[in-house]
Amino acid sequence: MKKFIIADEMFEMFPDLQIGILVCEGISNEYDELNPESSYETKIRESEKTAKKHLTESVFSENQVVKCWREAFQKFKTKKGARCSIEALLKRIEKENHLGTINPLVDIYNIISLQYGIPCGGEDIDNIEGDILLTKAVGVESFITLGSDKSEPPYEGEVIYKDDEGAICRCWNWREGKRTMLTEDTKNAFMCLEQVDATRMFELKEALDILRQQIESKLGAKCRIEILNSEKKEIELA
């Protein structure tokens, strides 16, 4: 039985940490006549406009969505220049650099991420070896990202998602590993939304529910919602 486990050390650094989880089964992750690629592109453009509500400060780093994650990243060892996934998305919006479509599942979580200003991501459960842990890296975990064939292990103390075979996402939510990434062939997925800002937990729950609705209605999946925090640190995935 595979599990997702948040290590105690994460709550030592981030006492208010909450992670919303969707365990999705039976996904049909391909564009089709009812949900063509063009419809996702339209939704992405709409969400890019919505995302501008998170950019109210003249200095980009002073926007609360960006600021809280920069402060979080300062609490552990990171690769130079690594930024939270939501900051990377919002930086593109600020520069009027449009997001492209990837596959329906990734498009959906990018749309939700932009709308709510919350980091979203996912992994293919069938390609996970053993349990998924959110923890600090030992520093020897294998990690190969998209577009590379060379392993680039995380730093010792870097926050990562990992399984029995190696790291699956580096610098918390900065860079995705190729081995477990969501593709058109993904049938079962582990989706997560991350929040370190204690004032925005309601939005986390709302975003998680909308993500569930979208995946179930558009991709025919059956989804289960879980929210992990310092009181509940692990769940069964499959």
Image (tube, helix red, strand yellow):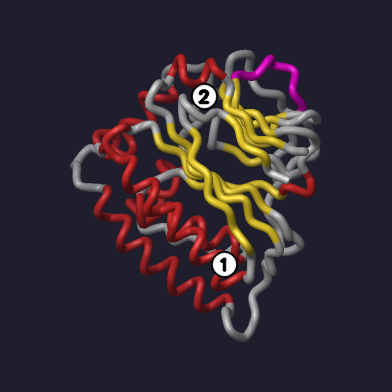
Can you name the residue that lies furthest to the bottom here? Answer: 33
Judged left or right of residue 169, residue 38 is left
Q: Quadrant of the N terminus?
A: top right
Residue type at numbered disc 2: Lys
Residue 160 placement (x, y as % from top left): 61, 28
* Front tag of 2 and 1: 1
| C-alpha span from label 2 to label 1 | 38 Å
Q: Which residue is mark 1?
A: 216
Residue 209 visible at all:
yes
What secondary structure is the stretch in magenta mostly built from?
loop
Identify residue for label 2: 80
Residue sitting at x 64%, y 65% = 221
Q: Is residue 173 left or right of residue 57?
A: right
x, y percent for residue 50: 30, 61
Q: Is residue 102 above or below residue 70?
A: below
Q: Earlier in the sequence, mark 2 or mark 1?
A: 2
The answer to which of 204 and 70 lies nearer the viewer is 204
Question: Range of the magenta residues?
Answer: 136-142
**Secondary element at tag 2:** loop
Q: For residue 121, which numbered disc appears in the image?
A: none
Report x, y in % for residue 6.
Answer: 57, 27
Q: In the figure, residue 65 lies in which quadrant? A: top left
**Residue depicted at x 25% and y 48%:** 55
In this rendering, is residue 106 above or below 228?
below
